[in-house]
Image: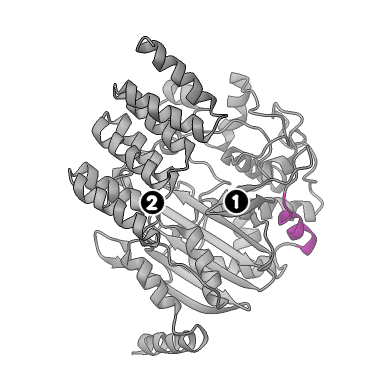
Amino acid sequence: MKNRLVLLLITIFFTNNLSGQDLNDFFSTLSNKNLVNGSVLISKSGKTIFSNNYGFSNIEKKEKLNDQSQFPIASITKTFTATAILQLQQKGKLNINEPVQKYLTDFPYPNISIKRLLNNTSGLAQEYTLFDTIIKEQPEKIISNQDIIPTFIRFKTPLSFSPGSKWEYNNVNFCLAALIIEKLSGISYRDYIEKNIFGPAKMKDSFVPLDRKIKSLNQVELYAYPNFYSTNLVNKNTLKETFLIVEKSNFYGPGGIVSTALDLQKYQKALFNYLILGKKELEEALTATKLNDGKTVSYTIDGKEISYGLGWEIYTDEREGKIVFHDGFITGLTSILLHNITKNQSVILLCNLGNSPVFPISNAVLNLINDEPYTIPTQNLSRIYGSLIENGNKEKASELVEQYLKNPSSYEASERDFNRLGYQFLRLQKCDNALEVFNSATLIFPKSWNVFDSYGEALHQCGKKAEAIKMYQKSVELNPENENGKQMLLKIEKEIGK
């Protein structure tokens, strides 16, 4: 009865302030579309205005989520690691402009500073294939942070680019930052975070696991789609990871922290009220990175231009206030902690689904609580379309595309998703399916040279060379600088004897 009264009061509050729209309806709609299964917490003017849980912590057992449900927060962890490094700087134990080599003496790259780790401009190799030889030699070994530098030394691993010349998201950077934290503090990364962040922020339901494969009592199960054309979620434990290193590692620093939405709010409040980090250091963390050539780091997420600070992502457009965030993704988990510093508004979303569009959801929430127009994220067109194709319902799939072309707001459609779907069918040697996907993609994205290029590649691989030529010609017409298309045209014409 008490919970119903609270929900009624929440509904009345939002009805009076948001023209009949309320956040519970918003998230219930997303939950019904299988786009949200998790914990939500939203604050405005520093006060919680909405907190709720949707769905199950364990779908198989129908165990419902609650405020104590613990989620891996994935890359939101990077903000904790950056905070820890800046705490050490604040105490005078390091300077982030100093070389990593000063503190990790075996580190083989003298020109990389600690700051280059935190802003992802180091040029270090990624972890995805770095340890393949070691895993082959020692199949039972679990790779950890301590294995990174010896591996760099053994294989004389070259840098991907000169430090500071480019930006590249890289988990290895934050693994090394965690090693520096341990070296200077004299305690484990786990104990440091507990003592210097979790404790002061009163985060009683958060921890860094010793082994991330061993779950706590309240930790949620994770769910994902097994492929790009499935519409049925499965437990992550039944899936094989794309990269072997994911199963064979136990890294900490770039990810790994387990927390709750309520605890993340405590962290956000402690951090932005300067209770765990000084104002000067926090402002440094939230300053957009500039490369060696003076250009500001910039990339796009869901149509919004983003830059990167020290462990934090930053909106470049500040017309609605200075907005910072970090999202996270691992198989079966999506997360985001977003904070508008200017307006003192926050969105925290932890979902044990691998497909939850947390970034567009959080942007819609910001618009909603500020009485601005918003769009509720919709289901993924390519996934539903792919499912119909795979099940032999090509006529219904075509009708779905026609429906979308008449009403583009009915589904979420991206060129990237259709490309990934088409190539997955192609890798599975399902040529008919792949060609159907790429053909539909040309209807949905008729001005995309890349889609026609991909269609040409699929036709060529499926033995339809004459049709492939037409697609490559269209691609080059749309983008005269498409050198791959030009080379493929020459290659195919030579193959057919033109």
Pointers 1 and 2 in contact (CB under 8 A)?
no
Label tally: 2
Rendered location of residue 475, percent (x, y): 47, 32
Identified at 62% across, 53% down, the residue is: 305
Q: Nearer the viewer, residue 29 or 413?
A: 413
Q: Quadrant of residue 466?
A: top left
Q: Magenta part mainly helix, strand or loop?
A: helix
* Magenta stretch bounds: 278-288
**Residue wearing tag 1:** 78
Give yes or no for residue 282 being in the magenta stretch: yes
Identified at 63% across, 52% down, the residue is: 306
Q: Secondary structure at mark 2?
A: loop
Q: Is residue 183 above or below residue 274?
A: above
Identified at 66% across, 33% down, the residue is: 123
**Relative horizontal placement of residue 5, taking residue 152 as reference (left or right):** left
**Relative horizontal placement of residue 192, taking residue 208 as reference (left or right):** right
**Relative horizontal placement of residue 318, taking residue 194 as reference (left or right):** right
Query: Please, what is the three-letter code of the amino acid marked with disc 2?
Result: Gly
**Relative horizontal placement of residue 314, taking residue 21 as reference (left or right):** right
Dot 1 or dot 2, earlier in sequence: 1
**Residue wearing tag 2:** 332
Rendered location of residue 69, percent (x, y): 41, 65
Query: Please, what is the three-letter code of the amino acid marked with disc 1?
Result: Lys
Q: Residues within 10 Å of mark 1 (few under 14, many from 20)?
A: many
Q: Quadrant of the C terminus?
A: top left
